[in-house]
Amino acid sequence: MSENVLETSHLDASYASQYKNLYQVAFRITGSIHDAEDVMQEAYINAFKGFDSFGGRSAISTWLYRITVNCALKYMKPRKNFPVERMAADKGVTVEFFFESLKDFRQVEDEVLYNDMRETCVHMFTECLPTKQRLTFVLRVIMDLSVADTAAILEISESAVKTNLYRARVTLRQAMDGKCAFIDPKFPCKCKLWVNYAIENNRRDLIASVPVINRNEKALENQILSEMNFLKKVSILYRSELKVGDADVFIKKMKSILNQSEMKVLKS
């Protein structure tokens, strides 16, 4: 077996072992399943083409995370306000009045829509974070990577990671304050109320479809309410295991795309 084939096999094995984590990073940064899939394809191609120059200067997992993050950056979308703020302004009412009006809609018991609504909402909060804060939050809090690993992936100092995370916590607290009932049950914004509103007003566009593995929502809620630390409460909201395709199938598909590309170059 040639050295090149051995190196490619090593890359594929490493990519397969990190596939779910890399996909989670791509999704949490972009907030879109479609964009995350594009990021994964672009990241694999970049890793494949750049593997010869990798040289083992860092752990291969760190290198793959870095490539994925860099590819995801171009798909990031900032958020200046939330839908409820825009809707309240359009109706000429306060946000508090709009939240209160949500209670008037009939209850809809749809766990899938409820899950999708929560995922939609938590990503809106992530979109409020400036780039440095968002990347640090995704890696350090959602992915639960160490400060050292986060610093290596983002190519910043460990003190910068800690500073970014502190600022992200402040930004998120300001964004969630007075809204998210998962953070504080006294807050008015509840996922089920939004599901009711979306269905009654034919606004399913407010709810993104996010393929997640089902989990016990009551247990999740109890755990959140029992946590005292704000950042821990927030991190629990993001503990959704995405339904991700088979890594080997993905790699095989990407190899086919790369081979077709090489054939076109040879024929030209």
Image: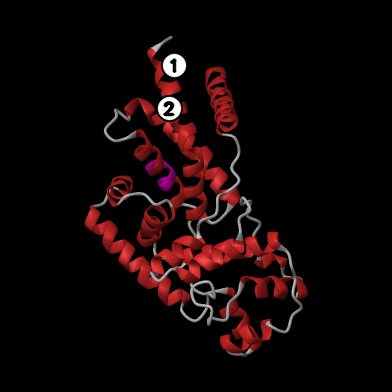
- The numbered mark at residue 11 is 2
Q: Residues within 10 Å of mark 2 (few under 14, many from 20)?
A: some
Which residues lie in the magenta part?
66-70
Give the Cα separation between the discs numbered 1 and 2: 10 Å
Residue occupied by mark 1: 5
Left or right: 91 with respect to 234?
right
What colouring style does the render use?
A: secondary structure
Q: What residue type is labelled 2?
A: Leu
Q: Is residue 74 visible?
A: yes
Above or below residue 260? Residue 70 is below
Above or below residue 73? Residue 260 is above
Q: Does 187 lie within the magenta span?
A: no
Residue located 62% across and 90% down the image = 92
Left or right: 158 with respect to 232?
left
User: Mark 1–mark 2 contact, CB under 8 Å?
Assistant: no
Q: Dividing the image into 4 quarters, which one contains the C terminus? A: top right
Q: Residues within 10 Å of mark 1 (few under 14, many from 20)?
A: few
Above or below residue 175? Residue 141 is above
- The numbered mark at residue 147 is none
Q: What residue type is labelled 1?
A: Val
Q: Which of 100 and 185 is in front in this view?
A: 185
Image location of residue 204, percent across then percent down: 72, 66
Left or right: 235 with respect to 92?
left
Q: Does 67 lie within the magenta span?
A: yes
Kindly report the secondary structure that dominates the magenta region of the rendered protein: helix
> How many discs mark residues in the rendered view?
2
Image location of residue 91, percent across then percent down: 65, 87
Image location of residue 135, percent across then percent down: 39, 55
First in residue order: circle 1 vs circle 2: 1
Above or below residue 166? Residue 158 is above
**Residue 106 occupies quadrant:** bottom right
